[in-house]
Image (cartoon, rainbow, N blue to C red):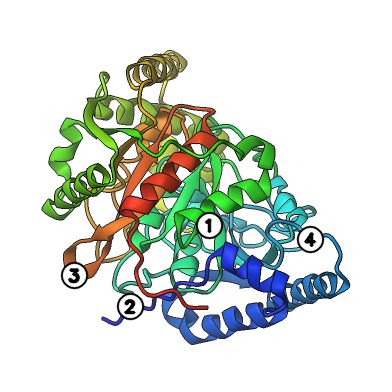
Amino acid sequence: MTPLIQRPDSIRIIRQAYSSGTLDPVDLLERFLQRCDEVEDRVQAWIIFDKDSALQQARECARRQRAGEAIGPLHGIPFAVKDVIDIAGLSTRAGSRSREFSGPARADAAIVTALRAAGAIIVGKVHTTEYAFFEGPPPTRNPWDIRRTPGGSSSGSAAAVAAGMVVASLGTQTAGSVVRPAAYCGIAAFKPTSQTGSTYGVVPFAPSFDTVGWFAARVTDVADIALGLEPQRYRARPAPTQLRIGIVRDELLENASPDVMSNVEEVICKLSSAGHVVEDVRCRPGLNTLNTQHRVMLEYEIGRIYAELPGLPAGQVNQALLDAIARGGNIRLDAYARAREGIQEAQSQVWGDWSTYDAVMFPAAPGVAPLGMKTGDPSFIVPFTALAGPITTVPTGFGEEGMPLGMMVCARPYTDGDLLQASLRIAEAIEVAPVPTQA
């Protein structure tokens, strides 16, 4: 199976080309539009491909560039947007037949407003699983092997970047929906500290965890996007040359494939060779405990937010989501409160235990993207989502049949800028590029 992978130039290189006048935003966008024409029929990332609007935005970027006007830090960078995030004038379907006839959004989501203010070009909306749940997969395929899932729920977000149809994309994470698709598709991603950044204009799933994140080809790109969106929040001093990095060891690793464990050891070797101090660390509550507590909270919340969905006609909502809503409706408030308290206690305990480390790392998934359209196992990611801190996904190697592998780089909440700086240092040692850079 020939991979449908194309790695665009970095945001920094594109900005330099714009500044020197050797590249025009319209020309760049047209290259990406041509790429979409070449591979979209097989990848199937897009639900709304807003070509005319994207070209209009690119022409305005080009005009500003020629006029010497002030331009934003993401000037002329094409983005895709997960279809749980509102774009003014376009419908938000959230991957569900139950929203098939929803009207166009009246306003941009806050994150889309921020992208536009930074100068980005919004190309359109990409597929998601239904309501960003684990199931209800969209038609999107993994560009590395179209027989395989790109992961979920941000399926189209990851696939569009990996296939070279955009420079970057927006997704959301409630369980593992940014980290897992990035790892499965061999690209980088960033999930900020949970419940930071506005979710105005984002279809909710479980509000205690819903967080907007983004995808790009490499770690430098996701860091540049962060600075482009909120420089005051994400600006930090460069990380020290020598980092202290914890490699999380837990019984959950018993579920990891030999390829994943081999990749972990290879990453440790590379980090040590680069001069970093790498040590094993433990999560005292146990990652499986956090998985259980997260599931209780998530299902309790969706059981109340979406209590009306089981009343819709048959076929409007997939059965797996209906079952989760039913389970959530039966969870008592005291059980929800215990799960929330347990997660809060774990956050305090774990980040206290790991306070001397610049970052901790863990595999992004038990294996490579599985065959078929099931979105894969989120159990390696969920505990770190529950711990609420920022997470960078770094592509680190290849496993079964040449499919990508990735690792999470994590830190305590509200250290997003420092975590991105540490991730850049870590990426220098371990990040693996899928193919030579090409525009």
Query: Given contact means CB atoms under 8 Å apart, are the residues at marks 1 and 2 in contact?
Result: no
Point out the image quarter for the N terminus.
Answer: bottom left
Q: Residues within 10 Å of mark 4 (few under 14, many from 20)?
A: some
Which one is earlier in the sequence, the residue at label 2 or at label 4?
2
Circle 4: element type:
loop
**Front position among marks 2 and 4:** 4
Residue 401 shows which numbered tag? 3
Q: Residue at x 36, y 68 (%)?
A: 142
User: Measured from the top left, where is residue 391 in percent x and y?
Assistant: 44, 40
In the rendered structure, which amino acid carries the disc numbered 3? Answer: Glu
Q: Which mark is residue 71?
A: 4
Comparing marks 4 and 3, which lies closer to the viewer?
Answer: 4
Position above or below: 297 against 183: above
Q: What amino acid type is highlighted by mark number 2?
A: Pro
**Horizontal side of residue 225 vs 178, given as left or right:** right
Report the Cα–Cα distance between label 3 and label 2: 11 Å
Q: Earlier in the sequence, mark 1 or mark 2?
A: 2
